[in-house]
Structures are given as C-alpha cells and as structure tokens.
C-alpha cells in the first residue's frame, strides 16, 4: 500500500486548517479574541474557509475522534491522540471512521494492518485479532477525488481480495 500511504500522508486535518484561518483572521485584526461573540463568529467563518480550501485542494480530509484518548505505539513508543480518524470527502460528504492505530501503522511503519492479542478476563491469550483497512469503505469515501492511479489500484486490489475472503468465509460457514 505504498502509493496509498503517500497519498494518505498528504491529507489535511480539518482542525489544523481551521486554526490556520483563525490565526490569519487574528493577524488581519478582523475580530477581537476577547469578545466571546466575535470569537464564535470568527470560529464559524474559519471552519467554512477551511472546508472551502480543502475542497479546492481536491483531497479527502480527516478529523480526530475522541482526541482525549492517548494511544502509545508498542513498536516506536510514539504517543498519538484520538481513537479514530474520521475521513471525509469534502465534495460528496461521504465519511467513515478508521482506527488511529491503523493510520499510524501505515503512515509511520508502512504496515497495512496490525494484529492485536485477544485476552480474557484473567489475561490468558485467547487468540489474535487482525485489523485491516476497509478498502471498500475507503473507495466509497474517496470516490470523485483525483486519486493517484497507483493508490487507487492498490485499494481496488485490496477491496477485491477482501471481497473474495468474505465470500470464502461465508461459503465455509455454510458447511
Ligand atoms: Zn509506531
């Protein structure tokens, strides 16, 4: 998923764009930050401008869900905030949530999935849980964006593979 990894790395975070715009407006002196009403209006304006800029940039964007949650990577010890990335298409408004660890594993370590141990109440290892990108969901979200062809191909191949696995699992259950 190297091409998709590179593409994902270019997506803006909505809050960052919003703060950029708010800083500009403060610089321009268009509002008084000590005035609650003006601040509220400036915030609203900044959000609108941020979304317009993202739309003009023709990329999906993300927001961090539950930013109070801290997750520490067991491999690199980096601390990441949030439980999920909510990925959105600025034009179609299609959106979906993806685990922060999945994003970290791909962006930082180049891994397209991760494995988590399943333990019971007394800490006995019961098995493993594999977490993968939901390629079908991602394709639906980014549909209509100018996606780099290699990245699109990677996601389409992954979606096809996941559909096959799902069909095989469903067939297996039938016996
Ligand atoms: Zn890490």
Image: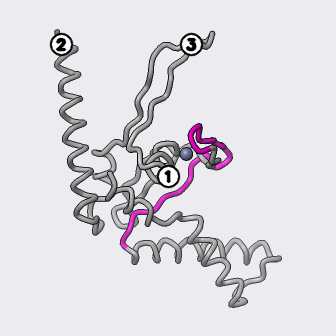
Q: Quadrant of the C terminus?
A: top left
Q: Nearer the viewer, residue 113 or 141?
A: 113
Local crowd at mark 1 within 10 Å, few (<14), some, or many (≥20)? few
- The coloring applied to the image is one colour
Task: Write down which quadrant ligand 1 falls in.
Answer: top right
Local crowd at mark 2 within 10 Å, few (<14), some, or many (≥20)? few
The residue wearing badge 1 is 108
Whether the residues at callouts 3 and 1 have beta carbons within 8 Å, the answer is no
Residue at 48% in and 71% down: 51
Q: CA distance from mark 3 to mark 1?
A: 30 Å
Whether the residues at callouts 2 and 1 have beta carbons within 8 Å, the answer is no
Local crowd at mark 3 within 10 Å, few (<14), some, or many (≥20)? few
Quadrant of residue 169 in the image?
top left
The magenta span reads 58-76
Sequence-wise first label, 2 or 1 = 1
Q: Is residue 63 magenta?
A: yes
Left or right, 100 with respect to 175, comes to right
Residue at 40% in and 39% down: 113
């Amino acid at each position: 998923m190297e091409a998709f990894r590179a593409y994902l790395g270019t997506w803006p975070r909505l809050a960052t764009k919003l703060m950029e715009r708010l800083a500009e407006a403060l610089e321009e002196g268009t509002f008084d930050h000590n005035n609650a009403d003006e601040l509220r209006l400036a915030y609203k304006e900044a959000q609108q401008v941020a979304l317009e800029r993202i739309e003009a940039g023709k990329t999906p964007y993300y927001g961090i869900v539950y930013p109070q949650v801290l997750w520490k990577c067991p491999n690199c010890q980096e601390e990441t905030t949030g439980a999920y990335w909510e990925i959105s298409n600025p034009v179609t408004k299609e959106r979906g949530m993806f685990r922060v660890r999945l994003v970290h594993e791909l962006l930082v370590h180049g891994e397209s999935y991760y494995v988590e141990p399943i333990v019971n109440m007394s800490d006995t290892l019961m098995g493993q849980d594999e977490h993968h990108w939901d390629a079908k969901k991602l394709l639906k979200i980014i549909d209509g964006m100018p996606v780099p062809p290699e990245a699109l191909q990677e996601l389409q191949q992954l979606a096809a593979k996941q559909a096959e696995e799902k069909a095989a699992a469903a067939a297996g259950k039938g016996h």
